[in-house]
Image (spheres, rainbow, N blue to C red):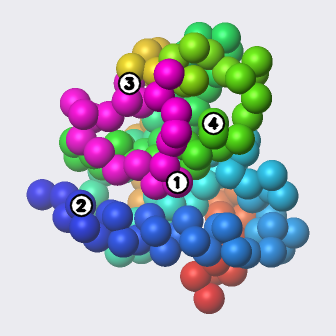
Amino acid sequence: MVNVQLLRREALIVRSAMESCDKGSSTILTQSFPIMNCKFASLLLAFHYFQLLDDTEIICVTGYGESSVSHVWLEIGEYLIDITGDQYNMIDDIELSEAVIKYRAFPKIHIEKAAQSYLPRIFERTERLILKQDFSGFKTSFVSKIKRSHSLLIS
């Protein structure tokens, strides 16, 4: 069973660290964080969760909506975890779909059961990638960047 309080607490810790870190040292987060950082931020959060949780399946979900708008979040059990949805509060309407605009304002951290979440309504087409705890599905150089960035964030 998923401990949602742990997921929330740790997501808050990681998100706060992402906001306050030196983006130049991170190697994967950009100066425009959270805008266009959803994939890397989600992978960093997944890496963090893997340091704390044993035998937990984490899925990285890429959702696609209208007007070529896409987004990335995590799925753990029945929960969807999004730590960069607030980027859509900062992006001009002209660049977004009607569905994204309809659900504004987005919180910095969204953790909700899939059945209650707005994410599947906005991003109807999805690709799902089951992450391995050792991130072995990624290139060694990328895993090194994730580890380095995580170490910088958590220190």
- Label 4: how many Cα within 10 Å (few below 14, some 14–19, many 20+): many
Disc 3 to disc 2, C-alpha distance: 19 Å
**Element type where label 1 sits in the image:** loop
Amino acid carrying mark 3 in the image: Pro
Please give the residue where the numbered disc 3 appears in the rendered image: 120
Q: Earlier in the sequence, mark 3 or mark 4?
A: 4
Q: Nearer the viewer, mark 2 or mark 1?
A: 1
**Element type where label 4 sits in the image:** helix
Please give the residue where the numbered disc 4 appears in the rendered image: 88
Disc 4 to disc 2, C-alpha distance: 24 Å
Of 103 and 21, nearer the camera is 103
Q: Earlier in the sequence, mark 3 or mark 1?
A: 1
Labels 2 & 1 near each other (Cβ < 8 A): no
Pinpoint residue 76: horizontal percent, then vertical percent. Answer: 30, 49
**Element type where label 2 sits in the image:** helix
Is residue 17 shown in magenta?
no
Residues shaded magenta: 102-120
Quick check: 115 left or right of 93?
A: left
Disc 1 to disc 4, C-alpha distance: 10 Å
Q: Earlier in the sequence, mark 1 or mark 4?
A: 4
Please give the residue where the numbered disc 2 appears in the rendered image: 4
Q: Residue at x 80, y 52 (%)?
A: 32
